[in-house]
Each structure stands twice: as structure tokens, then as C-alpha cells.
């Protein structure tokens, strides 16, 4: 479509406007688009200075951004690629329908891939680079289109027909000797196949942006050559409603990420109905992306429309599109050619004339842009060649394309998992598949033969592009972390120095960053609280990464703590976006797999704004086999005194316990932090275990002893004895900020009440419970063998009561209660936080030293080991109100 045909219509007598228009067109013809853009910028500037208040509309007519004249020649065999796409459509459909005929509860999706098949195929045949081509592209797949990706892998010979028969049957598949196919892209379940988890809407879009940015980070810091690699994301239009999908658009533009291309499959439908029934999602997204600074390529209509546009001298089509909302476009998609002739082309005489000579079947076959390989190639080529901006392609498709009456454009098409005989045969006929009626009815998986021209073409295209996708590497070169003494000696030999675990960690981090060979692999990440965590001294030493360097003189330039941005800066400061910072962490934590470059990210943040705020992203990180450290600082419900309810974390460890490959610790002392960090680095970088570590850190200074001899293994296991004898009357367990209160309570028990207490540091209830659970399972499965004993049970053997005190909810220490034979009492911070001092908060939550003493005496009284009067005397002496409402009810 020519630019002239897209101009606004002018009234017959508007001579002045016509002169302006003709002058602009003359300038375009004489000096080209660049000069026209300069003049328009000049006029806009003049208008703004004069207070006119005009700005250009961010939208364009509902037509393709790339005109027929600008379209490159299609480089492939069009007929061959259409046949291949038809095979994949059929096999994807057959896979899902067969699974649901056999097991109705398995689910699966047909309609999404039916709409996106051509978008994927052009990418696979012409653009998506495999690992042998500059390291390969990063491709994020629309999750509901997974059956189509499996169908392609089958024709490539990477999956068997037996594998396809076990779609969504991962457990059964192993029993049958097949590869089970996960419902959506899940690297945890298919570690050699899927690279990125995208099954939770919004996760793929934000992740793709931060992966593209991290590629620039690696390049600018000289750690990897990422030139020639592109991040492609194929997402759904409904998915764009997710906040994560939209939250980092301006970052991508600001960072000029021209290594990033999104393809938004605008089939106009989400699960229940239209994405924008009374509007147009493509128009909305165009304005949004353009305003954010992206290049927008609209891919709306297929080649079948080119002739109609060429004859449409009255611009009746453009006007009709402008007057049609998505709800109506969906109806047009669901109806046949006769309906569209009457209700779309029948709107006025100009449209009727355009449809003359077209049969109803030809009208029915008028393709939308996302179903036309030639148009798709033109859009992808323009996006791949564009520099200076990320690009989004808004591709209009039909949901359930080719499913006819059974699903094309239907409100229920997303849930369509079964087709009757007529629908199956109609689908076969629609895509000209060489299957007999019997084969089609049996939903036979189609394979044209290894020597067929189609498969020879398919393999040749992938070989030219550097190998097959999706594919994931599981290992990278192992790294040997520095000796713990090189960065943690001060913590191991603290000798009573007063410091918080946050202060200790930051000092260790600084030591790691300074290590000559290992330091460059360390990636410190913060949202916007580095100064709160005592990290300001790292700014000047290591720099904050900025793709633009530092083009200003910071206010504190003369300070040793000055704010320094640099092209080769090492710190990633992401602003007030926990989702962005976590996505940045994931990009670094999976660099070993994505780039073959192991990195060690440390993301430190307010612990309340981690698992609670971005738990879905952390779950996806676990799926993706991330390796790195998450540091929940200012942790615990009573250490962050004045901040109150929204900031005081009392449950992140419970959330962390639900993530199978997250190893969570609540260290109380500097040497515990050092031992855990050393163990984590060895596990993730040297042994290459697919785990990540969560440590909570406090901002409360305590006196730190030196590392006792021989406790390192028990620190990692989750529990070790700090002081006291095995003959003590009661065992007190403390962790994190509450260890100091437990130690003080032990002294009061001895001095005030003559009761000896043994003090234990519980560094991880999660690790204790997991080991105990595994031991219990083994004992249940081996009743003929001597029973094994878990570390927590063996450590706390005997009858002396156990009082476990935590700055988290009681449910955390109660994880291990069932594995301890002795009487067990958990004290924690159930309920909402408050703003007050630490002593006041600990009194409120009944976890300070007085409440610990009273709880210990009450438990001993119940066991008949002290008189009940002693326990009551203690409550009176400490002025504790036995009738007060519990904290969780206040």
C-alpha cells in the first residue's frame, strides 16, 4: 500500500490543505523520507513553542507497515514451506486430540498453535539461529503453542512418534521407555530441549528483555561475544495484559536493544472471549510500544488483500477497518465467505465493487498477515535488520485457523481439545494432507519419509541456520571458587567483633569482586537499596553498569562513595522494580546454559519484596535451573523496627521451602554466612548442581564469635550445637536475629531459675525437614533394614524439651516437629507487623528472652520437671499478661 493512499481525505474546497499536502509529497519525491522527517520535526517544534498543543497520533491505519513495494523477495520454496507447515499443524492437532481421546483430563491446546504456526515456521526456516551460528539465538515460545514445536521436532528426528504419543504423560512415558512431553516449555522437565519457561503469562516477555540486556552486559564487560545473536519472543496479545509483559518496555528502548524482536500473535482472543471486543488490540499495542520507544511493524493482512488495496481508490477498506472492532473481526473469522460478503463487503457500494469477481470460497480464504509466509518474512527481515531500537511485530491471525466450524474464531476455541470425524476430515482437506479417511480418523501422525523433499528441505534450512531449536545446554566449564579464607577470613576469625550479617555479606562480596580471576564472574544486583545495605562503597570501585556510560558529573563526585556509572560497570542497579531485578538475576543465573559462561549473581533486596512479590518469577527461575544467590536483607519480622506491616518479612522462608531446588538459610552469625556462601559456590559452580541459594540477612549488630572447630557440615545440614551440655534440662533453638535472644534466655534460665539450657543454631529448617523427609521415606520403603536417623532427630535425641524460636511464623520450625521425639514448642511472629522498636516488637510477638524463658519453664512444668508455681512466678516477675490476645488476632 502506497503512502499516498494512506493520506487523510480532504474536502473538495480545502485548497490550503491540498497545497500543504502537495508540498510535502513534492519534498518526499525530491529529497526522500529523511528530509520529510526533519521538516515534520521542525513544524512540531514550532507548534509546541507557539502553544498549539498538537502531537502526532501514535497510531497508523489498520494496514501493513511494510508496503508491497518495500517487500523483499521471499528467499525460500513457498510451496514446500506451506506443505511443511501443514504437516506440523496436523501432527500438533493429532497429538492433542489423541491424548484427550485416551485420557480426557490431560488437556492441551490446538487453537493457539493453529494461529501461530506460520509465525513459527518463518522463524525456523529463515531467522532463528542455532548454537552453531554465533552461539545461537534465544527464542521464547508462546507456551500454548508447544504442541507445534513438538510436531516440528518430530519431523526433525529429535522426537519419536512414541514420544508424541506421550504428550502430557511424563510419568507414564518413563515407564514405557519414551520421552514424556511437558505441557508447556519447562527446562526442569525437558532439560535438553526447552531453554526458557514461559507457561506463566508475562514471565516470557519480561525475561526476554533482561536476557537481551544481559547479552549486552556480557559483551561490554568483555566476557562473551554476543554480536550476531538475537532474542526472539513469540507471545500472545492477551498476554500483553500482564504487568510483567509491559513493565520493562522502556528499559528495552532506553538500552537500545536492537538484539530484541517480539512477535505478538494477535489472534484477538484470550481464553474466554475477545482481548478487546470493543476496541482493537493492535491499535492499542501500537500506541503503547511506539510510545515506549520501540519500532512497531504491523502485519495485518496477507497477500490476498494486495489486489483489493490496489483497486481501492476510495480507501473504503481502510475506512471499514477503522470502523470495525476486534469483536466483529472475531465474528468475521468464525463465519464463512458468504457471511463476510454480506456483512463486511456489503457495508457500502465501494466495498461491494471490490468483492465483485471473488467467490465466497475466495473471500473465506482471504488470509490475515500472520498466516502469509511472504508477509511474515518481510516483517521479520525488517526487524532483524533494524538498528537502534527493539522491534515488535504485531501479527494479526485467526485463533484456531483452519479448524473451520469446530474452532476457527469461536469463543470456545481455546478449550477445544476434541474434534468429531467431520471436523478432522475438514482440517485434513483444508491443508491438503495426503492422508486417507481411515488415517485421518485414526489421527495418524504423519511422516513423509526421511528421503522426502520436504524433510531434506527442512534439514537443509536448519543446517544453514546453525542447528536445531529449541535446544538447551546443561553444562558449562566448571569454575573453582576462591578459598573461603581469601574473602571470609574476618568472619571465620571474628573474635567477638560486632557486625550484622548484612555487613558481613557485603564485605565478603567485596572480597569476591576483588579476586583477580574469579571476580569478573560475580554479578551484584540491587533494585534500589544499595546504600541501605551498606553497598555504596562498591559504586566507585566496581561501577554500575550503563550502556551509555556516565554522561554527567555526579553530585558526589569528590566522595569515596561516589555514584559511578560505566560501560564496563559490574553492578546491575535495576531501579524500583523487583520483577526487573529478579529477571536480571535469572539472566545471570542461567548464563552457564544460555551462553556457556558461568556467572555468579548475588541479588540483595528487602526480604519482604522477594518471594512474596515476585514468587512466580522465582518459580520460573527454579524451572530454568538457575544458579545463584538471593539475599533477603533486613529480614525477619522484628529486625526492621519502624518500617511496619508491609516491610516486615515473617514468611519468605515458608515460601522458599516450597521451591524444590532452593536451598534456604537463615544464618545468625558472620561465619555461618561465609560457610554457606562457600558451600553454595562449590555446589553451583564447581559441582554444577542445579540449585540456587536463599539467605536471609539482618541489619542488627551482634557480637560474632570465631568459627568453632568442625561445625561446617552441620551448618549446611541446618543445625549445630553452640553452647551447653547434653545433660541440659531444655534445648533452645535460635536462628537469624533470634539467636541472640535465645542465648540471653539461656543465661536468664540459669541465673534466675537454676535451669541449664543447651543452645543450638538452626541455620535451615528447610534443609532439616528435607533430609528428615527423605530418611522417613527410606525407612518406609525398607522395613526390612535398620532404620536410619535424620540429622535433626539424632541431634535432638532424648527427652529434654525443645523450644524453637524464629523471627518467622511458627510454621517454619514446625516443619521439623514431627521428626523430634521430645516435647516441641515453636515461637514465632505470626500476625501482621507493626512499627516500633525491636524490643517492643519482640515483646508483642512473644519471642523476646522473657517469653522464651517462660515458655521453657511452662513446658518443663507440663513435663513435671519444675513446679507449675515456678513457671507462674516467672510470668509475674517479667510482667507478662497471660490473658492478652494472641499477636495474630491483634
Image: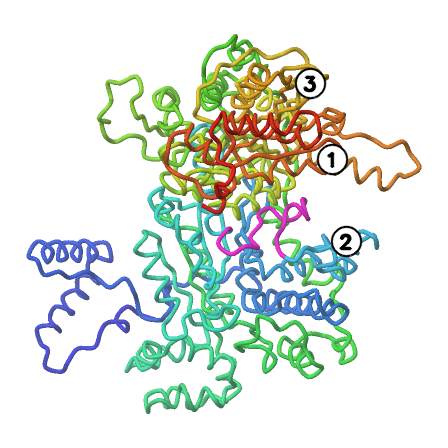
Give whichever of discs 1 and 2 has the lower sequence position. 2
Give whichever of discs 3 and 1 has the lower sequence position. 3
Q: Which residue is mark 1?
A: 819
Q: Quadrant of the C terminus?
A: top left
Please state if 141 lies on the left or on the right of 27 as rendered.
right
Span of residues in magenta: 184-203
Q: Residue at x 79, y 56 (%)?
A: 172
Q: Residue at x 80, y 40 (%)?
A: 777
Between the residue at mark 3 and the residue at mark 1, the CA separation in whole angstroms equals 20 Å
Q: Would you place residue 593 above or below residue 686 in this image? A: below
Q: Would you place residue 858 above or below residue 410 in this image? A: above
Disc 1 residue crowd, few under 14, some 14–19, many 20+, Cα 10 Å: many
Observer-nearest residue: 878 or 838?
A: 878
Q: Which residue is mark 3?
A: 728
Observer-nearest residue: 400 or 348?
A: 400
Q: Would you place residue 834 above or below residue 634 in this image? A: below
Please state if 603 lies on the left or on the right of 281 as rendered.
right
Quick check: can you spot residue 103?
yes
Q: Quadrant of the N terminus?
A: bottom left
Q: Tell me the element at label 2.
A: helix
Between the residue at mark 1 and the residue at mark 2, the CA separation in whole angstroms equals 30 Å
User: In the rendered image, which quarter is residue 862 located in?
Assistant: top right
- Count of labels shown? 3
Q: Which residue is mark 2?
A: 171
**Residue 286: image location, x then y, percent:** 35, 62
**Residue 43: image location, x then y, percent:** 12, 57
**Residue 351: image location, x then y, percent:** 36, 87
Amino acid at each position: 500500500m502506497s503512502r499516498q493512499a494512506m493520506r487523510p481525505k480532504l474536502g473538495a474546497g480545502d485548497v490550503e490543505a491540498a497545497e500543504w499536502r502537495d508540498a510535502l509529497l513534492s519534498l518526499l519525491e525530491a529529497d526522500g523520507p529523511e528530509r520529510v522527517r526533519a521538516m515534520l520535526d521542525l513544524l512540531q517544534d514550532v507548534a509546541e513553542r507557539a502553544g498549539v498543543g498538537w502531537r502526532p497520533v501514535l497510531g497508523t491505519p489498520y494496514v501493513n507497515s511494510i508496503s508491497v513495494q518495500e517487500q523483499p523477495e521471499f528467499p525460500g520454496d513457498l510451496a514446500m514451506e506451506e506443505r511443511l507447515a501443514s504437516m506440523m499443524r496436523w501432527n500438533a492437532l493429532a497429538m492433542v486430540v489423541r491424548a484427550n481421546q485416551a485420557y480426557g483430563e490431560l488437556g492441551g491446546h490446538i487453537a493457539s498453535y493453529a494461529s501461530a504456526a506460520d509465525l513459527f515456521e518463518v522463524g525456523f526456516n529463515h531467522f532463528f539461529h542455532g548454537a552453531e551460528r554465533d552461539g545461537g539465538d534465544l527464542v521464547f515460545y508462546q507456551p500454548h503453542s508447544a504442541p507445534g514445536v513438538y510436531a516440528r521436532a518430530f519431523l526433525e528426528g529429535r522426537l519419536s512418534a512414541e514420544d508424541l504419543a506421550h504428550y502430557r504423560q511424563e510419568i507414564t512415558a518413563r515407564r514405557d521407555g519414551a520421552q514424556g512431553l511437558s505441557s508447556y516449555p519447562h527446562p526442569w522437565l525437558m532439560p535438553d530441549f526447552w531453554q526458557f519457561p514461559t507457561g506463566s503469562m508475562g514471565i516470557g516477555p519480561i525475561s526476554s528483555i533482561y536476557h537481551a540486556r544481559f547479552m549486552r552486559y556480557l559483551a561490554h564487560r568483555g566476557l562473551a561475544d554476543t554480536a550476531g545473536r538475537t532474542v526472539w519472543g513469540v507471545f500472545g496479545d492477551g498476554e500483553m495484559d500482564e504487568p510483567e509483559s509491559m513493565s520493562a518496555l522502556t528499559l528495552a528502548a532506553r538500552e537500545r536493544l536492537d538484539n530484541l524482536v517480539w512477535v505478538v500473535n494477535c489472534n484477538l482472543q484470550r481464553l474466554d472471549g475477545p482481548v478487546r471486543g470493543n476496541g482493537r488490540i493492535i491499535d492499542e499495542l501500537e500506541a503503547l510500544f511506539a510510545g515506549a520507544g520501540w519500532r512497531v511493524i504491523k502485519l495485518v493482512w496477507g497477500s490476498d488483500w494486495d489486489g483489493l488495496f490496489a483497486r481501492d481508490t476510495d480507501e473504503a477498506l481502510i475506512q471499514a477497518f477503522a470502523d470495525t472492532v476486534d469483536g466483529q473481526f472475531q465474528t468475521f473469522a468464525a463465519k464463512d465467505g458468504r457471511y463476510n460478503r454480506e456483512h463486511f463487503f456489503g457495508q457500502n457500494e465501494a466495498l461491494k465493487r471490490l468483492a465483485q469477481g471473488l467467490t465466497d470460497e475466495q473471500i473465506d480464504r482471504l488470509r490475515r498477515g500472520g498466516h502469509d509466509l511472504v508477509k511474515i518474512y518481510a516483517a521479520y527481515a525488517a526487524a532483524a535488520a533494524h538498528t537502534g531500537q527493539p522491534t515488535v511485530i504485531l501479527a494479526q491471525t485467526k485463533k484456531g485457523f483452519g479448524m473451520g466450524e469446530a474452532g476457527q474464531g469461536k469463543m470456545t476455541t481455546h478449550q477445544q481439545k476434541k474434534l468429531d470425524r467431520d471436523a478432522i476430515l475438514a482440517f485434513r482437506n483444508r491443508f491438503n494432507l495426503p492422508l486417507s479417511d481411515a488415517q485421518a480418523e485414526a489421527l495418524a501422525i504423519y511422516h513423509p519419509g526421511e528421503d522426502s523433499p520436504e524433510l531434506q528441505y527442512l534439514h537443509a534450512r536448519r543446517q544453514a541456520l546453525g542447528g536445531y531449536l529449541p535446544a538447551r545446554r546443561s553444562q558449562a566449564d566448571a569454575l573453582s571458587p576462591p578459598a573461603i579464607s581469601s574473602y571470609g577470613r574476618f568472619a571465620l576469625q571474628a573474635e567477638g567483633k560486632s557486625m550484622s550479617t548484612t555487613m558481613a555479606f557485603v564485605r565478603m562480596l567485596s572480597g569476591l569482586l576483588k579476586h583477580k580471576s574469579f571476580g569478573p564472574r560475580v554479578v551484584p544486583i540491587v533494585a534500589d537499596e544499595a546504600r541501605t545495605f551498606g553497598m555504596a562503597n562498591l559504586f566507585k570501585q566496581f561501577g554500575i553498569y550503563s550502556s551509555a556510560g556516565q554522561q554527567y558529573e555526579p553530585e558526589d563526585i569528590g566522595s569515596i562513595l561516589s555514584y559511578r556509572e560505566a560501560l564496563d560497570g559490574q553492578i546491575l542497579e535495576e531501579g524500583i522494580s523487583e520483577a526487573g531485578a529478579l529477571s536480571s538475576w535469572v539472566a545471570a543465573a542461567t548464563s552457564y546454559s544460555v551462553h556457556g559462561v558461568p556467572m555468579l549473581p548475588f541479588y540483595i533486596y528487602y526480604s519482604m519484596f522477594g518471594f512474596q512479590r515476585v514468587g512466580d518469577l522465582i518459580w520460573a527461575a527454579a524451572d530454568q535451573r538457575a544458579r545463584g544467590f538471593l539475599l533477603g536483607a533486613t529480614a525477619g519480622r522484628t529486625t526492621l523496627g519502624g518500617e511496619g506491616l508491609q516491610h516486615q518479612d515473617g514468611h519468605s522462608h515458608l515460601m522458599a521451602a516450597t521451591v524444590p531446588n532452593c536451598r534456604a538459610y537463615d544464618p545468625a552469625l558472620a561465619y555461618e554466612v561465609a560457610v554457606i556462601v562457600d558451600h553454595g559456590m562449590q555446589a553451583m559452580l564447581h559441582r554444577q548442581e542445579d540449585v540456587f541459594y536463599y539467605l536471609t540477612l539482618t541489619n542488627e549488630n551482634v557480637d560474632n564469635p570465631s568459627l568453632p572447630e568442625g561445625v561446617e557440615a552441620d551448618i549446611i545440614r541446618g543445625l549445630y550445637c553452640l553452647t551447653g551440655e547434653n545433660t541440659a534440662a531444655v534445648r533452645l533453638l535460635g536462628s537469624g536475629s533470634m539467636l541472640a535472644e535465645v542465648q540471653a534466655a539461656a543465661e536468664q534460665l540459669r541465673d534466675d531459675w537454676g535451669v541449664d539450657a543447651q543452645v543450638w543454631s538452626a541455620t535451615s529448617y528447610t534443609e532439616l525437614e528435607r533430609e528428615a523427609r527423605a530418611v522417613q521415606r527410606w525407612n518406609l520403603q525398607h522395613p526390612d533394614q535398620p532404620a536410619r536417623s535424620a540429622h535433626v532427630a539424632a541431634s535432638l535425641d532424648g527427652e529434654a524439651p525443645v523450644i524453637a524460636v524464629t523471627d518467622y511464623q511458627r510454621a517454619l520450625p514446625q516443619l521439623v516437629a514431627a521428626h523430634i521425639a521430645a516435647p516441641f514448642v515453636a515461637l514465632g511472629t505470626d500476625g501482621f507487623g507493626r512499627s516500633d522498636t525491636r524490643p517492643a516488637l519482640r515483646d508483642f510477638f512473644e519471642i523476646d528472652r522473657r517469653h522464651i524463658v517462660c515458655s521453657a519453664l511452662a513446658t518443663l512444668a507440663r513435663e513435671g520437671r519444675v513446679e507449675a508455681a515456678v513457671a507462674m512466678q516467672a510470668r509475674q516477675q517479667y510482667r507478662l499478661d497471660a490473658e492478652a490476645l494472641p499477636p495474630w488476632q491483634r
